[in-house]
Image (cartoon, rainbow, N blue to C red):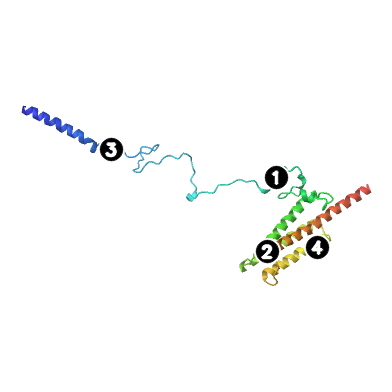
Amino acid sequence: MTLFSVWATWVVLLSLALVMAAPSSVFASGHALFGNFQLGASRGTCTNGPAQAPALFYTPKTENNVAQPLDVVSLSSPIAEIAATALNPQSCMYCRGKRYDYTAYFHNTNIFSEPPHELLKLVEESYLQKNRLQSLLINYALREIPQDSMEQARKGMEAWETEVNNLTMTIGSNEALEQLRSWSSDMMRQLWQHVLGVQKMKMPPGRTKELTSQFRKLWEVVWIRCVSMKCSILQEETATN
């Protein structure tokens, strides 16, 4: 073997050695060379962290990164009650108030000689006053009242008595209305004395329901009187004609 042949063989072996060593050096630096481009990002942006998968649905960001509660749409009380009574064939459309259906009450011949449809708004207001009376009794007769809540209690009682008086004045003046006003005023006087600790009211179980029932019955006397007066006027007009 000549010297030239030996030199040529050595050059070939050296070239093969360099090629075999290439993956461990050149290709290993490939990640740093190309970087980690996020899908859809511009070529100028590049991160070393993993690419974040695109969201399947768009979710708008909320302020302060606090999730906002969902608004659950529900039927309001008047709509729900009207929908319920509409399914009842015995429900009278002239007896449906904003919150209650008075068909069974107004058409009870043991109470009214004829349904007092023209009194619907007044009757419903009296029922709302009954509910407020119940709240006053629960809050101030069945619970201990902190000293800093005394003024709020007094204003609540005065507001309720004023509402009752205003409604009675809207109707007129008769013995039944005077009795109702007197009862309401005395009720608030007793409740206020109870709150002050002057004289405690006796409130056994069922007493709250008993008092609210008395209030409702006092109003019922008023409604019966109104219907009776209406019938008397109509009879007089008929007799005159």
Say if mark 3 contacts mark 2, CB within 8 Å: no
* 28 horizontally vs 102: left or right: left
**Residue at x 70% of width, y 57% of height:** 131
Hey, which residue is sitting farthest left in the picture?
Answer: 2
Q: Mark 2 is on which residue type?
A: Lys
What residue sits right under mark 4 in the picture? 179
Q: CA distance from mark 1 to mark 3?
A: 73 Å
Q: Position of residue 61 (x, y in %)?
A: 48, 46
**Residue at x 86% of width, y 53% of height:** 228
Q: Position of residue 7 (x, y in %)?
A: 9, 30
What residue sits right under mark 3 in the picture? 30
Which quarter of the rendering shows the N terminus? top left
Q: Position of residue 39 (x, y in %)?
A: 39, 37
Say if mark 4 contacts mark 1, CB within 8 Å: no
Q: Nearer the viewer, mark 1 or mark 3?
A: 1
What residue sits right under mark 2 in the picture? 155
Q: Position of residue 139 (x, y in %)?
A: 66, 63
Q: Secondary structure at mark 3?
A: helix
Q: Mark 3 is on which residue type?
A: Gly
What residue sits right under mark 1 in the picture? 84
Mark 4 or mark 1: whose residue is earlier in sequence = 1
Say if mark 1 contacts mark 3, CB within 8 Å: no
Q: Nearer the viewer, mark 4 or mark 1?
A: 1
Mark 4 neighbour class, 10 Å CA radius: few under 14, some 14 to 19, many 20 or more: some
Residue 119 vs 55, above or below: the answer is below
Q: CA distance from mark 3 to mark 4?
A: 98 Å
Q: Mark 1 is on which residue type?
A: Ala
Q: Secondary structure at mark 1?
A: helix
